[in-house]
Amino acid sequence: MTKDEALRLALEALEYTGLKWPQVEEAITAIKAALEAKDEPVAWMYEVNHAHTCLDLFEPPDDAYDEGTLYPLYTTPPQRTWVGLTDEEIQKCLQGLPTQTIDVYARRIEAKLRSKNNG
């Protein structure tokens, strides 16, 4: 169970009680705030001149790193939400493959999912 799942479970339980005690209302408010809060990077890693890897506590200016090498660093990795394929995307993956095996279909769909979730 993730931290957010545990917080949602606690929130649901507290709201279910219907209690209006100040401590309960304060806990509900705190849980909602924690669920809405987004984790911010604590540092940034990037390359300069394709030769040096740098670490910075603040995001460097646009011209300070090689394109595509800026990576935010977190104290804990952000939780990603899985993104599935729409029916239309599945059909696009299957286009032009009427005679190929199911393995080819599966690999194309897998590649599409990978690109949606690692992007």
Image: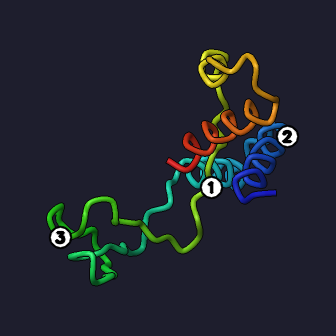
Q: Which residue is mark 2?
A: 17
> Residue 29 at what x, y percent from top left?
60, 48
Q: Position of residue 61 (x, y in %)?
A: 17, 65
Quarter of the image where the N terminus is located? bottom right
Query: For residue 104, which quarter of the picture?
Result: top right
Residue position marked by numbered label 3 in the rendering: 64
The residue that appears at 38% across and 75% down in the rendered structure is 43
Three-letter amino acid code of the residue under disc 1: Gln
**Alpha-carbon distance for marks 1 and 3?**
28 Å
Amino acid type for the residue under numbered disc 3: Ala
Q: Earlier in the sequence, mark 3 or mark 2?
A: 2
SS type, badge 2: helix
Q: Earlier in the sequence, mark 1 or mark 2?
A: 2
Residue 68 point in image, percent of width and height: 33, 59
Figure check: 40 above or below 29: below
**Disc number for residue 79:** 1
